[in-house]
Image (spheres, coloured by chain):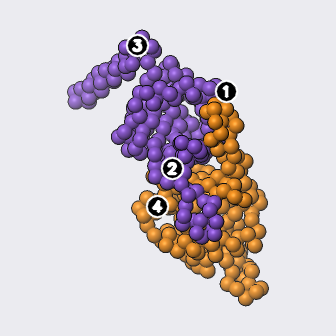
Chain colours: A orange, B purple
Amino acid sequence: MKRGTFLLVAVAAVAGVVAYMAAATSGQADGQAAPIFVTTIPHGYRDWRLISVAHEEGNLNSFAAILGNDVAIKAYREGKLPFPDGTIIAALHWRHEPSEENNKIFGRRQSFVAGPPTNVQFMVKDSKKYASTGGWGFGHFNERDGKKPGDAALLKSCFPCHQKAKDSDLVFTRYAP
Amino acid sequence: MKRGTFLLVAVAAVAGVVAYMAAATSGQADGQAAPIFVTTIPHGYRDWRLISVAHEEGNLNSFAAILGNDVAIKAYREGKLPFPDGTIIAALHWRHEPSEENNKIFGRRQSFVAGPPTNVQFMVKDSKKYASTGGWGFGHFNERDGKKPGDAALLKSCFPCHQKAKDSDLVFTRYAP
């Protein structure tokens, strides 16, 4: 190994240890085990294949497409539970908006489309890294480019709710044929 | 070219001509120019990328994901109109159903998911083949495997309605970021 390469590896190793320690100790001021959140948007998620669609009424008023990376789609189609490490599920949310344009053409108020984007959320399966939250890392970003990640208070609310979907490995979304 | 290969090509060519003639003359008994419908499900459409989502209330009560082949996605992302030949847009429809499971967890009736699949529809751009219907061939299949295509009466209703979306080359769906 060349000296330069070794240095890089050594620096990367130290950086990795520091990052791990930072992650492992963050949020532990209150003595709780730290959930480790997804802090970077997974690359290329907008090109992933469709798992299903979803719509929440009420305050959320949201319209969602749920996409999965190749590992996720394979697991869904084969009915594999729990989801294997490497699974990533993305929920793209928009406002659930009436389409005046379509309603005019149809002659009645019946048509809803994706309005402005609101956020994109991720579930990343890594049974070691995210052991304290059922093997899933949760992520929330207010912008599609990942520049406005959700804060810790918001992200802490993900796991307690998803935990209730134990029969489907904490995942709400079913595959839509 | 080997003799066997040539025979296959010749047979395919004849079959193609017969199919073309059948398509070109079908429905012309009443002297009208024949709209030529999409009669075969495009291969691999369930793996295509997402364009957007849609929801129709009323009698339709439908939940849709609109997917596009590579030509469609490229045109959408580049804002190209009219869509180039080779564009295929797929609308996968399911019933828009409340999720009792989710509502129980959320503690309120707000969650809707994709219910049983109802149909899948296609728009195929081929400005020569489908010249009489704005360059678009329309298809409707009651089963995801394409075994129950929509009848001519149903398919004849596609173009007059889509024709009203002239500003977007007869396509209702906008790309959702």
Instruction: Give the residue number, with chain letter if any, for mark 1.
Output: B167
Q: Secondary structure at mark 2?
A: strand
Please report whichever mark, 2 or 1, sits nearer to the chain's N-terminal start. Answer: 2
Point 69% across, 58% down: residue = A58
C-alpha span from label 2 to label 3: 37 Å
Extreme residue in the top direction:
B31
Residue A76 is marked as 4
Marks 3 and 1 in Cβ contact (< 8 Å): no
The x and y percentages for residue A16 are 68, 75
Image position of A164 with respect to B68: above or below:
below
* Horizontal arrangement in the rendering, residue B45 relative to residue A26 (left or right): left
Report crowding for label 2: few under 14, some 14 to 19, many 20 or more residues within 10 A (C-alpha). Answer: many
Point 75% across, 72% down: residue = A152
* Horizontal arrangement in the rendering, residue A122 relative to residue A69 (left or right): right
Examine the image and state in which quarter residue B74 appears: top right
Please report whichever mark, 2 or 3, sits nearer to the chain's N-terminal start. Answer: 3
Q: Are marks 2 and 3 on the same chain?
A: yes
Residue B30 is marked as 3
**Which chain hosts label 1?**
B
User: Marks 2 and 1: which is nearer the front?
Assistant: 2
**Which chain hosts label 2?**
B
Instruction: Give the residue number, with chain letter if any, for mark 2.
Output: B95
C-alpha span from label 2 to label 1: 29 Å
